[in-house]
Image: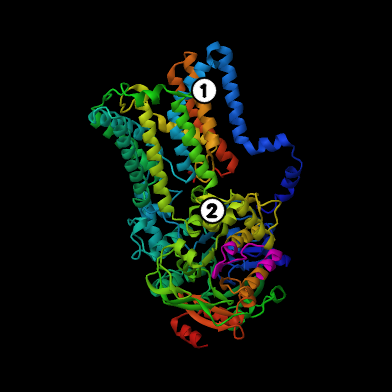
């Protein structure tokens, strides 16, 4: 291995990163040689973003090093990473809306004359030279304002920005998600040109087709470790999927099937700004897993069902009663609860006690006149805190002092206290240590036994497989397939979640 | 990050004496306010024998009543995540309206008060609607109100004091009456503060107000109609600002478009911030705010009694507001990057 120390390009060696109890990266050793496109693949949460963020200096590794041209570099900030020649093109380009393309590209390093005056002539000369050099002279008008750009043009601005100064490594994070086909072609041509100029290109994407078009090497991450590095010319789709999946968590799940035939939640062909033509049913005692890649529209669907996003067409029936869109209060009263994706941002009141956080949606049952009956409230909070085994000295403890797993239990306690008919859990175990995960799985199983209809959104395939009676897969705002417990495998779910076009989604429906 | 501070705090919970339990229930913020108040009283008391006399204490209390009323409702608005810098102008407008309605209704005090409160309700709801449905930042919306409502008050009064009300027994009672040795005005503050305190601490409405200010997304997803609450809270502020305006009329004897009400927004916000309200919302209480009102009142009176230029009082108040907020932000451990959130 010592010989690689003198290799040009970028490399990471023994890279590890922990966030509290969560291990995001574990002993990752990878090379990004110059003049090659290295694709980075992996399930949601496999560690791709963490790796990119370490390369760009946003995160510091817990252990291990980043090497550039064989030399260890310390990347303590994005500015240092940039100075070292590492660039990233983020998925969502950061564009300043009210200034021109030219100023956007050189923001932070604008050419200036004496007295800090902007040198407009030099700015124009530079942007025109750069556009010409990169072949975008006709695609991008340097005088356009940031707010006037199309998604593809925004991406181009980011790329131009990345190419100012000497770039040795350029990482693209799912660059094609908002591009049209012609724009993708232009982008690929550019990436190939960069590669031929000797840049080490890192390309993160879920789209198999693109990867095979573009990549020279494919590195697959799984659970924060390298599952394998393949030569793109020899690898097949099946090889990649096999590397991406294959975790064994089966011992953590203790599900008995208790689903009944009684449909509780009946979603009939609804469309919102984010999802299209969604129909699904959840029965009493049934756990339906909602799988898909990040950005597939699952959380948006959950928020729409909870009444927080307008439903444009179609209807949602809860035990036959139609829910009115845009009214979370009415939806809750009808019996639907949502434990949202971001517990801290969307569910918890961090500076309030466990008691306060638990009782919030049941206050109308706890009040006499408008006064909250304190003793009843305490009893209720204590009951659910005990039942879910929230580890805390007292229910008067502030929620922000609890661990992630215990915070999630408080969110669950809130909804259990309300006794809902339908409970939607969005990523219920994200950022939670293994022990607490097992407890949450047990709680979900118990709730199903009590006859609650559960819809569980999860990006962790083993979790979906372990929990769900039935798996619904979404991609791009649509349902691309539905699998029974017996049919569902990680490979099948993943291929439905990554299905390139509607052609394959039709197959999925009949599968 | 927030993994486990449990082990650290458990022994503290166990080994607490009665006294420290009592102190803990009062809270660190309030203890420092009480400390500050004691220091101010001792300092000016030693400089001037008259300062601690019952007479002067009553003067302090009366002077603090109007700003105290506004600070109490400002606290509610801030807990809910908003801010109202038009409170002073609202009180000024209510003062003018109360005196003019009183005069034109043939010296009918009830008509004057009802008109003022009606105007207060309308203005408060208008602020709320502009903020919620106009999507205008609360500071900007009420900054506009600060100018506009003051302008309306000056327009209808021609910029001069209006009417004379101290020929009416009700207004006389408000300004000079006493119940159980305490001025009526002070009683009014006590009643309003107590009612708001009960509302915040013991009702589901109060819980929901804290929830909205603490995390509005979570509050919305918990089914709270946050628009309704925000508008209602601004409406409540309008009513109490109108009561403050009526007291202003009673104290000075006539409707005052600007004098006595200008600067009340600064005083009320300073009191709320000093009293422990997080300006981001979700945190604070009436107890702290009242202590801060007392502290500010004692300080102002002391400076006046010592004959210190009143311009210094503005400096003192501005400094106190900034210091209070800086301490707050330090405690919450925000990263010093760019504009505060």
Q: From this view, report whether residue B124 is shown above or below residue A180.
A: above
- Report in which chain the residue with disc 2 lies: A
Q: Is residue A437 left or right of residue A207?
A: right
- With respect to residue A476, does B320 lie above or below? above
Image quadrant assignment for residue B12? top right
Q: Residue at x 48, y 78 (%)?
A: A280
Up-down relation of residue A83 to residue B271 (above or below): below
| Quadrant in the picture for residue B252 | top left
Q: Which of the pair B186/A119 is nearer the observer?
A: B186
Taking the magenta stretch, the answer to whether it contains residue A422 is yes
Q: Residue at position x 68%, y 70% from top?
A: A442
Label 2 environment density (alpha carbons within 10 Å; few <14, some 14–19, many ≥20): some
Residue segment shown in magenta: A415-441
**Residue plotted at (53% across, 76% down):** A211
Which numbered dot is residue A367? Answer: 2
Residue labelled with disc 1 = B298
Q: Can residue A236 be spotted in the picture? A: no
User: Are callouts 2 and 1 both on one chain?
Assistant: no
Q: Secondary structure at mark 2?
A: strand
Residue A205 is situated, as x and y percent measured from the top left of the image, at 53, 71
Q: Badge 1, how many Cα within 10 Å: few under 14, some, many 20+?
A: many
The answer to whether A484 appears left or right of B146 in the picture is right
Q: Looking at the picture, how far across and down is residue A178, in whole percent? A: 43, 68
Residue A236 image point, x, y percent: 58, 83
């Amino acid at each position: 291995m010592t010989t690689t120390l003198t290799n040009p390009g970028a490399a990471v060696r023994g890279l590890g990163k922990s966030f509290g109890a969560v291990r995001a990266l574990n002993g990752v050793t990878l090379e990004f040689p110059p003049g090659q496109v290295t694709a980075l693949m992996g399930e949601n949460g496999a560690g791709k973003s963490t790796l990119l963020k370490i390369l760009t200096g946003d995160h510091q590794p817990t252990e291990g090093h980043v090497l550039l041209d064989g030399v260890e570099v310390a990347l303590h900030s994005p500015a240092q990473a940039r100075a070292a020649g590492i660039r990233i093109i983020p998925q969502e380009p950061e564009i300043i809306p009210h200034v021109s393309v030219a100023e956007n590209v050189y923001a932070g390093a604008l050419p200036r004359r004496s007295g800090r005056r902007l040198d407009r002539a030099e700015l124009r000369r530079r942007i025109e030279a750069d556009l010409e050099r990169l072949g975008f002279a006709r695609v991008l008008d340097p005088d356009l304002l940031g707010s006037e750009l199309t998604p593809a043009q925004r991406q181009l601005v980011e790329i131009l920005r990345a190419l100012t100064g000497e770039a040795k490594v350029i990482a693209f994070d799912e660059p094609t998600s908002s591009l049209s086909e012609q724009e993708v072609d232009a982008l690929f041509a550019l990436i190939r040109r960069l590669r031929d100029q000797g840049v080490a290109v890192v390309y993160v994407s879920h789209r198999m087709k693109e990867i095979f078009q573009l990549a020279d090497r494919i590195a697959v991450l799984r659970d924060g470790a390298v599952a394998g590095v393949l030569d793109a010319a020899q690898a097949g789709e099946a090889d990649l999927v096999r590397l991406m999946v294959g975790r064994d968590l089966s011992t953590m799940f203790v599900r008995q099937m208790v689903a009944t035939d009684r449909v509780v939640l009946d979603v009939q062909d609804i469309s919102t700004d984010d999802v299209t033509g969604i129909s699904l049913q959840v029965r009493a005692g049934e756990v339906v897993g909602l799988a898909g890649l990040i950005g597939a529209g699952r959380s948006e669907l959950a928020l729409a069902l909870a009444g927080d996003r307008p439903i444009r067409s179609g209807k949602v029936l809860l035990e036959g009663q139609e829910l009115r869109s845009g009214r979370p209060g009415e939806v809750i009263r009808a019996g639907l609860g949502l434990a949202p994706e971001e517990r801290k941002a969307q569910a918890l009141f961090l500076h309030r006690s466990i008691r306060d956080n638990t009782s919030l949606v049941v206050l109308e049952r706890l009040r006499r006149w408008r006064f909250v009956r304190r003793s009843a409230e305490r009893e209720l909070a204590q009951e659910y805190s005990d039942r879910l085994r929230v580890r805390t000295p007292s229910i008067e403890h502030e929620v922000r002092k609890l661990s992630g797993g215990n915070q999630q239990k408080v969110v669950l306690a809130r909804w259990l206290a309300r006794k809902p008919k339908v409970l939607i859990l969005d990523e219920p175990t994200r950022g939670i240590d293994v022990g607490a995960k097992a407890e949450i799985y047990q709680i979900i199983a118990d709730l199903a036994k009590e006859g609650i209809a559960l819809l569980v959104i999860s990006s962790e395939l083993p979790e979906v497989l372990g929990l769900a009676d039935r798996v619904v897969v979404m991609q791009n705002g649509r349902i691309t397939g539905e699998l029974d417990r017996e049919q569902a495998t990680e490979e099948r779910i993943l291929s439905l979640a990554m299905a390139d076009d509607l052609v394959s989604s039709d197959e999925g429906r009949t599968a | 990050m927030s993994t486990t501070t449990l082990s650290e705090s458990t022994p503290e919970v166990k080994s607490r004496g009665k006294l420290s339990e009592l102190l803990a229930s009062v809270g660190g913020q309030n203890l420092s306010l009480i400390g500050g108040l004691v220091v101010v009283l001792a300092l000016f008391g030693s400089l001037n024998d008259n300062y601690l006399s019952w007479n002067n204490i009553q003067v302090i209390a009366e002077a603090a009543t109007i700003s105290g009323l506004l600070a109490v409702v400002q606290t509610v608005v801030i807990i809910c995540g908003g801010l109202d810098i038009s409170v002073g102008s609202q009180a000024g407008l209510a003062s003018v309206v109360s005196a003019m309605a009183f005069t034109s209704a043939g010296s009918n005090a009830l008509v004057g008060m009802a008109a003022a409160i009606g105007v207060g309700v309308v203005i408060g709801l208008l602020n709320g609607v502009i903020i919620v449905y106009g999507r205008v930042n609360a500071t900007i919306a009420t900054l506009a109100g600060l100018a506009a409502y003051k302008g309306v008050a000056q327009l209808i009064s021609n910029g001069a004091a209006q009417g004379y009300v101290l020929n009416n027994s009700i207004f006389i009672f408000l300004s000079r009456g006493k119940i159980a040795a305490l001025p009526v005005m002070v009683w009014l503050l006590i009643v309003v503060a107590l009612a708001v305190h009960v509302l915040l601490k013991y009702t589901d409405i109060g819980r929901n107000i804290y929830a909205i200010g603490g995390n509005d997304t979570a509050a919305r997803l918990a089914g709270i109609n946050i628009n309704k609450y925000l508008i209602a809270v601004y409406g409540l502020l309008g009513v109490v600002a109108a009561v403050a305006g009526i007291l202003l009329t009673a104290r000075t004897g006539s409707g005052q478009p600007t004098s006595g009400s200008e600067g009340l927004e600064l005083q009320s916000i300073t009191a709320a911030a000093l009293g422990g309200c997080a300006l981001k919302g979700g945190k604070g209480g009436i107890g702290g705010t009242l202590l801060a009102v007392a502290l500010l009142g004692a300080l102002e009176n002391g400076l006046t009694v010592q004959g210190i230029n009143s311009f210094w009082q503005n400096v003192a108040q501005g400094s106190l507001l900034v210091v209070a907020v800086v301490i707050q932000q330090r405690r919450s451990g925000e990263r010093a990057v760019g504009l505060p959130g």
